[in-house]
Structure formats: structure tokens, C-alpha cells
């Protein structure tokens, strides 16, 4: 009897131990799952905290960005306000008054005739064509596309002071607007290039090889300050040869027959824009101050560049008009 009791007790212990072992084994996955759940919850809370911080940081960055944008707008506004006075200092002032526009000789091309009197108000014009160095600053500051022959956003080595080329009329206009200027009208260009005495070339009535870059003298462009003896009566450089220069006007070969006498702006429309001045490839007839040509405004050429001009700033005009009144007082 005692033996059977002992056996029963032993079996009971064995089965209890087995049951406990089974229970423990059964709880292992549940425990592991709970640990995973706890870890995921902890990770979720950390991610939520990080996300909250990121949103706060993003809000702070947006605030800083808005402040920077406002500051940039203020600086850009201030830059534009200062540009007219800066341009006055670096440009040449062309006085108001009449001049003879066009060619008088009977053998002159028909698009240069008839010679006619044109009156222009005061304006300012750059003494040099825009150089590669100046145009690169525009490209770097605005992200505007660079000329097709530039490599890695810069001009060929050693050509910083050469006139920029391979720029379309639209490219030239974009640059001009960026510096608070514009392209010169055809009439403004011609007056600045020859003065009021009807000379054929910027320096006089006789062609001189050594005063401009023409006839493929060097087979390409030269620095814009290469020919001091070739300057115009107003002191402008490179008004003959080196590169043609874009003008604001549409081109019409018959425009002179109907041109207004007061500050003409060119035809109202057309297929081409005026280019003036000739280039390094041209000979003497094409570098005359009266020579006219036209090319498509989207075209880019290695022989075409530009210079900029500006109307008289309002404050300059008002102060000039006020001077007689002050004298009378």
C-alpha cells in the first residue's frame, strides 16, 4: 500500500513537473512577443519624439527661410534702386540734340538712305561691349545659361576682356535688365558711334586698319580696350569691328524712309533685330558707322555681342530741369 502511494506521488510530481515545463515552454513565445511589442512601442515613442522634433526644426527652418527670402527681396530691391546711379557712373553720357543718321553718299546701300535728322534726348551708353568676365558674373549670380562655346560655365582661357559672343538678342536683353539697363536703340547706337559731324568711322572719315579689329586681323575677337585710337567722339571703344552689337530695334531695310525725327524706336515688328558695328570678319564697308544689318533674335553667332544703354534717370532729369528755376530764383 505504501509502495503504491509512493509511486502515485512520484508520478504526480513527474506529471506536475512536466506540466510546469510545458507551461514555461508555452509562455516563451508569448514572453518574446511581449518583449518585441515593448521594444516596438519604445521605438514608436522614440520615432514620434524624433518626428515632433523634426517638425519643430522644419518650422524653425521655414521661419529662417522666409526671413532670408524677405532679406533677399530687400537686398534685390535695394540693388535695383542703386543700379541707375551705378550705371550713370560707369556709362558715358550722350547729350541731347540732333544728329544726321544714315549715309549721304549715292553709292551707299539703300538701307542706309536717305540721311535724315534725328533728335535724341539725353541717354547713357556703356563705353565698352559687355565682356566675357562681366557676362560670367551674370551667369553665376542668376543661373542663366552660358554661351554655347564656354566650358564648365566659363569662357576660354585668356578671353576675360574679350566681348562676349554667341549670345542671342534675348540673352543680351536678359543681361541688360539684370543690371538695370537696356539695349540701345539703333539711333542711339549710331549717334554714340559717330557723333554729329557725319563721319563714316568712329575716329573720322578715312578708314585706318590699325584702329579696329576687322579684315580677320587676328582671326577672332580681341580685348575691348585694344584700340584707343579707334574711339568715337564720345570716347566709346569698339564701335567698329571686333563684334556686331545687338540693338533694341526690329530691322527693316526701308525704315529710314519713314523714320520719325524724334527718338525713333524702330519698326513695331519684324523678323529680325538690328545689329551694328561690323565684326572682326568684315572689311571696311561693313565697319562704317552707318552700316546696318539684321539677324534673327534667337540666333547666336561668334561675331555678335552687345553693349548696354540707359535712359536718363528720372532724378537726373528732374535736377537738370530744376537748375534754370534755381538760377531765376
Image (cartoon, grey):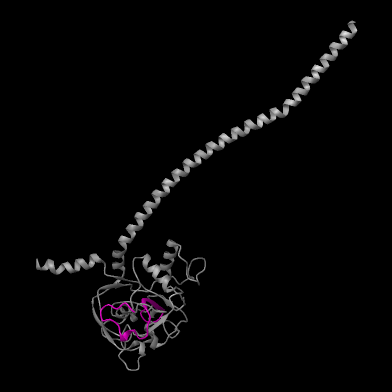
Answer whether residue 131 is visible to the viewer in this image. Answer: no
* Residue pictured at 62% horizontal, 30% vertical: 38
> Furthest-bottom residue in view?
106
The number of numbered discs placed on residues in the rendered structure image is 0
Residue 205 in which image quadrant: bottom left
Is residue 258 in the magenta section? yes
Is residue 119 in the magenta section? no
User: Residue 85 or 159: which is nearer the viewer?
Assistant: 85
Quarter of the rendering occupied by the N terminus: top right
Query: Where is residue 256 drawn, in percent x and y?
Result: 32, 85
The overriding secondary structure of the stretch rendered in magenta is loop
Quarter of the rendering occupied by the C terminus: bottom left
Query: Where is residue 301 drawn, in percent x and y?
Result: 46, 77
The magenta region covers: 238-266
Residue 316 in which image quadrant: bottom left
* Residue pictured at 49% horizontal, 42% vertical: 55
> Furthest-top residue in view?
1
> 305 left or right of 127?
right
* Residue pictured at 41% horizontal, 74% vertical: 169
Query: Where is residue 73 drawn, in percent x and y?
Result: 36, 55
User: Residue 289 or 23: which is nearer the viewer?
Assistant: 23
Answer whether residue 252 is visible to the viewer in this image. Answer: yes
Q: Is residue 259 above or below residue 328?
A: below
Query: Where is residue 124 drawn, in percent x and y?
Result: 29, 72
Amino acid at each position: 500500500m505504501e509502495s503504491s502511494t509512493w509511486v502515485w506521488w512520484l508520478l504526480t510530481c513527474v506529471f506536475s513537473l512536466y506540466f510546469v515545463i510545458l507551461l514555461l515552454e508555452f509562455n516563451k513565445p508569448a514572453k518574446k512577443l511581449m518583449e518585441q511589442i515593448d521594444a516596438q512601442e519604445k521605438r514608436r515613442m522614440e520615432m514620434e519624439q524624433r518626428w515632433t522634433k523634426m517638425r519643430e526644426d522644419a518650422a524653425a527652418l521655414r521661419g529662417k527661410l522666409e526671413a532670408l527670402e524677405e532679406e533677399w527681396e530687400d537686398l534685390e530691391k535695394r540693388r535695383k534702386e542703386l543700379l541707375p546711379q551705378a550705371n550713370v557712373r560707369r556709362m558715358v553720357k550722350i547729350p541731347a540734340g540732333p544728329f544726321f543718321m544714315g549715309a549721304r553718299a549715292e553709292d551707299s546701300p539703300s538701307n542706309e538712305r536717305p540721311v535724315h535728322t534725328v533728335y535724341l534726348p539725353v541717354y547713357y551708353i556703356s563705353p565698352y561691349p559687355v565682356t566675357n568676365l562681366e557676362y560670367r558674373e551674370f551667369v553665376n549670380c542668376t543661373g542663366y545659361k552660358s554661351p554655347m562655346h564656354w566650358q564648365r560655365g566659363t569662357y576660354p582661357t585668356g578671353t576675360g576682356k574679350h566681348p562676349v559672343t554667341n549670345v542671342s538678342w534675348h540673352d543680351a536683353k536678359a543681361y541688360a535688365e539684370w543690371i538695370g539697363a537696356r539695349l540701345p536703340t539703333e539711333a542711339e547706337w549710331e549717334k554714340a558711334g559717330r557723333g554729329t559731324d557725319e563721319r563714316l568711322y568712329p575716329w573720322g572719315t578715312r578708314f585706318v586698319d590699325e584702329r579696329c579689329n576687322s579684315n580677320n586681323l587676328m582671326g577672332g575677337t580681341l580685348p575691348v580696350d585694344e584700340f584707343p585710337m579707334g574711339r568715337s567722339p564720345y570716347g566709346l571703344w569698339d564701335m567698329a569691328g571686333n563684334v556686331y552689337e545687338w540693338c533694341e530695334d526690329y530691322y527693316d531695310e526701308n525704315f529710314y524712309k519713314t523714320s520719325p525725327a524724334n527718338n525713333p524706336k524702330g519698326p513695331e515688328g519684324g523678323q529680325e533685330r538690328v545689329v551694328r558695328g561690323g565684326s572682326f570678319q568684315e572689311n571696311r564697308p561693313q565697319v562704317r558707322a552707318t552700316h546696318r544689318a539684321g539677324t534673327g533674335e534667337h540666333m547666336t553667332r561668334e561675331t555678335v555681342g552687345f553693349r548696354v544703354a540707359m535712359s536718363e534717370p528720372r532724378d537726373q532729369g528732374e535736377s537738370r530741369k530744376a537748375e534754370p528755376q534755381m538760377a531765376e530764383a
